[in-house]
Image (cartoon, coloured by chain):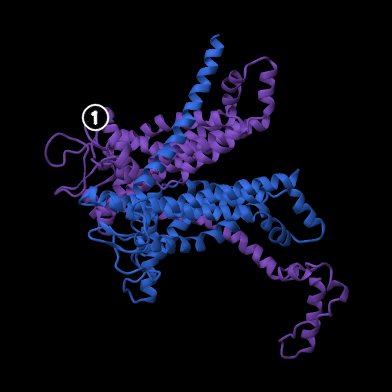
Chain colours: A purple, B blue
Amino acid sequence: MSATSRSRSNHAAAHDTHGASPPPPQPPPPPEQEDESANSAVFRLAGWRKTPPKWHGAAEVAIKVTALVAIVAIVLIFVFIGLEALPLFTSKVVRSEVTPSSMWLQQTWGEGAPRWSWQPASEIPKYSIVPLVIGSLKITIVALVVGAPLGILSAIFTSQIAPRWLREILKPTIELLAGIPSVVIGVFALLVMATWAQKLFGFEHRLNAIVAGCALSLTIIPLVFTLAEDALSSVPKSFADASLALGASKMYTVTHVIVPAALPGIAAGVVLGFGRAIGETMIVVMASGNAALSNWSLGTSTRTITATIAQEMAEVVHGSPHYVVLFGLGATLLMFAFVTNVVAQRIVESFRRKRGGS
Amino acid sequence: MKGRARDAMLLGSTALAALVVVSMLFIILFDVVKSGVSVLSWTFLTAAPSGGMQAGGVGPAIFGTAALTILMTVAVVPVGVITAIWLSEYSRPDSKLAHTVRLAVSNLAGVPSIVFGLFGLGFFVQTVGRGVDKVAFGGVATYGKPGILWASLTLAILTMPVVIVATEEALRAVPRELRDASLALGATKFQTTFLVVVPQATGGILTSAILAVSRGAGEVAPILFTGAAYFLVELPTNLNDQFMNLGYHTYVLATQSPDVDKTRPQLYGTVLVLLMLTFLLNLLAVIIRVRARRSLASARS
């Protein structure tokens, strides 16, 4: 088709001495094509013709180019977070106040014993990331210890034990938890959970790692639940059938056959939950108390990496050492997130390969 | 006997866990509704905050949130849906490029929201915005400052994985036979995709857009430095204006108030509005998804 039209236009061009070829004469469409079906007008509008219009090809190229946006976005994120944090290594002005090693190692800060300290607004600005990392880890560990078992156990209940009607209610209900914005959970933690915790345990500070961790667990429960439920439900039915046929009880089958078979998926969920918890911002800003202390006590006020960025970024001057350090914190978080993602991906992939081989 | 005790323990512990999770959800909903519902009124929904955030309403915050999410949707849905179409319909299973796109999507989904905020500041505001100012506005800070355009684009990148994953799932649920039938009748790949597959997946694509809107409407960390404002007298009318936002307003009321007890009714009212917005959207998405799954299942059998 295209070959004949080209030869026709070449032919026309040969006659036209000015070089501008007129459009090739189109033969009138045969009349029987007009009324193929009642829908033909609609279909024709949408581009359904015997010969597809030329723009379809261009559109297909555009589709492929659009698919690259996700790659461009993630690359830009790494590049720009990295670029804004780069002066930590290159700028003399910034390095006179803070270097990557001074962020991680204990400093004397002019007087007193060497220690880790995050006091960016003091006379001698102190940028030690260690109290923040400890804070993030404390809260994340609490969130995982509380959230992972709850998520996994409710996934086991939902996918294996609950009757069908209950499963159809439970699954969407627990997934709705993921739809609650984190500021709302933050408010709930700040006003309600903190008061409960204070009454029950009488912590040193009203807002602390336990309160923030428990609130944070509410965001990782639906994540762990969804992934664990998927993994449990995708265990082939033949596994359970074989176990039951050998005389094992339903519960024995669940604990000894189905859960082990789904373990990689469950583990991937927990790893992703860790990544989610360490990167969560609004809940910890509101519920953790935000004092940068370098201790492992769970009952004291705690400041995380994310909360520090959220609270301090708005006040810093563009390009100042403090600005650069906050982007350094962002780069650290990004690396954390990247590594957890890769680990989870590896777990799932090795699982798929094993399943595919068996 | 020992086996029976173990069975009972498994049943008990898993049922208890599910009960705890579901009841936490309902406790939160109950607390917010109980304390927030008395504040709700037409004035609260339309008026601006007044009296040091202790009176008035959340009108500008609702407007700002709506404007933000509409801009975000306009940016993210076409890109996300088209990416999903390419992944599901065009890419080969062993394609290196498709693998890379998927890797990028899963990594985007894992980037902490506050890092998106930093990215929006470092890339959109400081780099693109300042660049535009230099070229088009003679260096006068016009787009080189936080504004609703930059905030919505930041949110668009954040919600892109949501749209891509949900749309791809919807497209994959369309039976293969439909594609084969269309191709066998002589339709091209493009015609098959857009006249047969995509119309079948409309419900799922709509769900993906709703999920993205719901996620975007509730996010605060990415807009902290890219355009959200504490308090504004005027509504945003230009793409480079700052804006108020329900989530950010919640954060401000909860943490920056000089008198927590006096702002509490306002706070709960705001939370209730925000929760209704995101929650109803999520519920809608769940319902559409269940319906689509059922109709596809009945079409198959």
The correct choice, above or below, for B240 with respect to A300 in the image is below
Residue, far left? A111
Where B38 falls versus A111 (above or below)?
below
Residue type for callout 1: Gly
Q: Quadrant of residue B229?
A: bottom left
Residue at the bottom extreme of this rendering: A17
Q: Which residue is mark 1?
A: A202
Q: Quadrant of the C terminus of chain B?
A: top right
Chain under callout 1: A
Which residue appears farthest toward the top when viewing the image?
B1
The residue depicted at 47 percent of the width and 56 percent of the height is B157
Residue sitting nearer the eye, B180 or B100 = B180
Q: In the shown orientation, is residue B160 left or right of residue A22? A: left
Looking at the image, which is closer to me, A199 or A73?
A199
Q: Describe residue B232's horizontal placement relative to residue B15 as left or right.
A: left
> Does residue A101 sit above or below B87 in this rendering?
above
Horizontal and vertical percent position of residue A56: 69, 67
